């Protein structure tokens, strides 16, 4: 018999699992679900181990199998990305960013990046990551008509302020940034170029989004759990031979000590599965995002950037000012089991009062949804926004989800394998 409070906690976990995986339409653009095989191998003994240092050069004993996995994982990512340096040890995208800033200009300096309302992540901004390292920020200018960085004005900013680093990529990321053009300008002025690929990493690996390293970026940082459907983690990939030592030493001993080693095997499984199924998955994700945007427009909930075809990623952004603003709408949608986040848009005065919501279709795509299902989702959203009681929509959403409970784009697992893993951990004999 377990103590009552533990039974309660287990209940919460089970209720959460069932709710988020089986009853909701999850449209959080930065989330995903792992494949069954990745999830199975995520449960392993490495969760409690240390491997400070680098492969073959650790501070502790007992790391030979960790070394093996970290080594093949690193090499496989390097090959997939055409990188000369890959570091899988950062535990998150934010840690990967901070380690990279510190490695490239340890004495501090200036970063040219996008403010949050143009899609920049907090770790590119002085409220977040830049603050920790006391880095200065200059804003990259925005072209509203193109919903993208304004290259001509960015040239002026870069030439005048001479930043140490230019950061591209972002959290609200509808269209690929002009990586090639900006990289050329940045390099001519002596700046490093970092593309934060956190949101689009699965699309890059799946081949439907340009590989920033091929477009001229020196470094990619990313999370491994957004469109790339692995466990939560971070990664640095670079083509800067002279900075390898600095990058390695920024990750450890500066920014991490344990690397959450149990995620390595699951990340490896995810990468191999992406090699098998990723092209189709990524193509579908972008197709579904476009379909959702068009369907929302038909339902009277028009997303931003209509003239540009709404999106070329997994994301759709909607200005919901006329429905009460991002805060209110996101809360109302949750009552209907449709999970989205409020999001600042370029015209917002304060990011604390966002006019928008951001929708990502990657997770629902993994559960097997296609264009028809995107049209159904648009209808559910429109019903909530038109003032219908969310409780009624919630019942219909839960019913709708019943047909989409199996995670696609991965290898199947069987009972025998599950038993083997559980036994190896001593969970049962
Ligand atoms: C563009 C971008 N970079 C970095 C991060 C941070 O990643 P993590 O949550 O893994 O630290 C995010 C998170 O959503 C993001 O959107």
Image (spheres, rainbow, N blue to C red):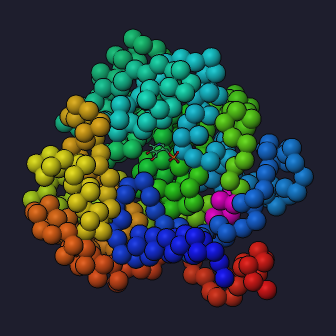
- 350 or 76: nearer the viewer: 350
Question: Where does the N terminus fall, quadrant-wise?
Answer: bottom right
Q: In this view, does 377 lie above or below 152?
A: below
Whether residue 47 appears in this view of the structure is yes
Percent x, y of residue 214? 51, 41
Q: Main secondary structure of the magenta part?
A: helix
Q: Is residue 113 magenta?
A: no
Percent x, y of residue 23? 36, 75
Percent x, y of residue 146? 23, 38
Q: In this view, does 151 lie above or below 269?
A: above
Residue placed at 88% from the left, 57% from the top?
Answer: 62
Residue at the limit of the structure toward the bottom, as seen here = 415
Residue placed at 50% from the left, 27% from the top?
Answer: 130
Image side of residue 1 versus residue 153, left or right: right
Residue placed at 62% from the left, 34% from the top?
Answer: 99
User: In this picture, which residue range is highlighted in magenta?
Assistant: 262-266
Image side of residue 296 versus residue 139, left or right: left
Residue at the limit of the structure toward the right, as seen here = 61
């Amino acid at each position: 018999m377990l103590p009552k409070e533990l039974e309660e906690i287990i209940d919460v976990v089970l209720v959460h699992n069932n709710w988020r995986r089986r009853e909701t339409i999850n449209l959080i653009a930065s989330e995903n679900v792992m494949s069954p095989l990745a999830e199975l191998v995520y449960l392993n003994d490495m969760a409690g181990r240390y491997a400070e240092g680098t492969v073959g050069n650790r501070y502790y004993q007992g790391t030979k199998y960790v070394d093996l996995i970290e080594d093949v994982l690193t090499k496989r990512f390097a090959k997939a990305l055409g990188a000369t340096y890959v570091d899988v040890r950062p535990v998150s995208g934010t840690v990967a960013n901070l380690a990279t800033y510190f490695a490239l200009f340890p004495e501090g300096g200036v970063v040219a990046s996008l403010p949050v309302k143009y899609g920049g992540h907090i770790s590119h901004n002085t409220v977040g990551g830049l603050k920790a390292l006391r880095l200065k920020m200059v804003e990259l200018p925005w072209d509203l008509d193109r919903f993208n960085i304004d290259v001509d004005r960015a040239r002026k900013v870069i030439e005048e302020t001479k930043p140490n680093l230019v950061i591209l990529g972002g959290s609200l990321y509808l269209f690929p940034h002009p990586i090639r053009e900006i990289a050329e300008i940045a390099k001519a002025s002596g700046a490093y170029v970092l593309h934060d690929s956190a949101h689009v990493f699965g699309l890059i690996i799946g081949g439907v989004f340009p590989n920033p390293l091929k477009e001229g970026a020196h470094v990619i940082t990313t999370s491994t759990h957004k469109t790339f459907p692995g466990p939560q983690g971070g990664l640095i990939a670079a083509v800067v031979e002279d900075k390898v030592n600095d990058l390695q030493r920024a990750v450890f001993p500066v920014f991490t000590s344990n690397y959450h080693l149990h995620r390595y095997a699951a990340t490896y499984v995810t990468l191999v599965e992406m090699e098998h199924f990723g092209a189709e998955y990524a193509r579908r994700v972008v197709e579904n995002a476009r379909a959702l945007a068009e369907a929302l427009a038909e339902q009277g909930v028009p997303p931003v950037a209509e003239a540009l075809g709404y999106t070329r990623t997994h994301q759709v952004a909607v200005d919901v000012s006329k429905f009460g603003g991002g805060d209110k709408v996101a809360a109302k949608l949750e009552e209907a089991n449709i999970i989205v986040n409020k999001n600042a848009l370029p015209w917002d005065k304060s990011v604390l009062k966002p006019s928008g919501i951001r929708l990502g279709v990657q997770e629902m795509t993994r559960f097997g949804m296609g264009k028809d299902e995107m049209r159904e989702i648009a209808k559910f959203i429109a019903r909530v926004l038109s003032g219908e009681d969310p409780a009624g929509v919630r019942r219909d959403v839960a019913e709708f989800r019943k047909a989409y409970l199996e995670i696609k784009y991965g290898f199947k697992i069987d009972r025998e394998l599950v038993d083997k893993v559980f036994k190896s951990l001593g969970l049962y004999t």
